[in-house]
Image (cartoon, rainbow, N blue to C red):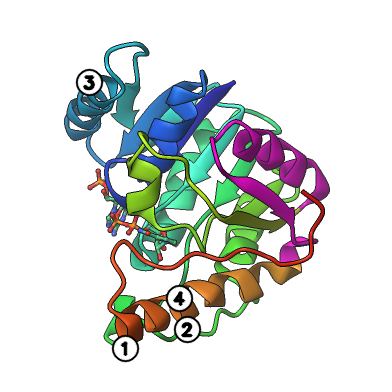
Amino acid sequence: MKVAVVGGTAGIGYGIALRCAKAGDDVVIGGRAAEKSQRIAGEATEALGGNVTVGGDANENAVKDAELVVVTVPYPGLADTYKAIKPSLTEGATILDCNVPLASEMGGKPTRVMGIWEGSVAQQAKSILGMEFPVASGFHTVMGAKLVDTDHELGGDVLVAGDMAARRVVQGLVGKIAGARFVDCGPLENARILESLTALLIGINIRYKLDPGAGLKIAGLPE
Ligand SMILES: NC(=O)c1ccc[n+]([C@@H]2O[C@H](COP(=O)([O-])OP(=O)(O)OC[C@H]3O[C@@H](n4cnc5c(N)ncnc54)[C@H](OP(=O)(O)O)[C@@H]3O)[C@@H](O)[C@H]2O)c1
């Protein structure tokens, strides 16, 4: 599967790019500047031992032909990024939005989320892109550093809400990540609950001085 990671030059996006490439997907890292994306893609290829080649390009080019587009961009740049990539998206491409409207992005606390008119960042993305693109929202309770550390199994659950078709695509992606378990969290309207969990975990990380940070595992699910 061709996967583009918009905002994949650092943080959680870089980690998802590494994990997808390691699992055999055809991955392109996107960023605002093509040169930087190509440099980071070279580092990703090296980090994976040269066994796979990760591509890099400007966001608008990276998404061309991608079946799955993962978007990991800090909230202040998110709406503009969606508007910029929309004309280049392949018809029917699945969107995985991993973003959180942390209040710290606008001068507030990282333990709080901002209210979003549409209900969540993922629903805001859907309103920008339109009904033709299935949208899922996920990975909010997975720390980027754990994804980047590809020598170790991920551990913990990957909570995903979204349009049914998008949930199924993301379930396939999570199934390829060693030590990750997909948890179906229902329709896209539940994204606002998932997004707020990041702020909750950041508060736990601060209080317990955790690095790389806490994750979540849902008790009682069949293995
Ligand atoms: N990191 C985590 O562990 C984690 C966990 C759960 C959820 N999240 C959420 O995932 C999203 C990304 O977080 P992150 O920590 O991975 O972000 P980040 O490392 O700060 O940024 C990721 C990439 O986004 C691009 N970017 C930065 N500012 C931008 C802007 N104004 N407009 C467009 N692109 C911009 C940059 O790439 P270029 O400079 O190459 O364009 C950057 O490398 C956030 O909403 C965050 O809350 C993160």
* Mark closer to the chain start, 3 or 2: 3
Q: Secondary structure at mark 1?
A: loop
* Mark closer to the chain start, 2 or 4: 2
Q: Residue 220 vs residue 175: left or right?
A: right
Residue under numbered circle 1? 108
Q: CA distance from mark 3 to mark 2?
A: 38 Å
Q: CA distance from mark 3 to mark 1?
A: 37 Å
Q: Secondary structure at mark 4?
A: helix
Q: CA distance from mark 4 to mark 1?
A: 16 Å
Q: Nearer the viewer, residue 41 or 51?
A: 51
* Mark closer to the chain start, 3 or 1: 3
Q: x%, y% of residue 162?
A: 73, 55
**The residue stretch that appears in magenta:** 163-188
Q: What label sits on residue 201 in the rendered view?
A: 4
Residue under numbered circle 2? 114
Q: CA distance from mark 2 to mark 4?
A: 16 Å
Q: CA distance from mark 3 to mark 4?
A: 31 Å
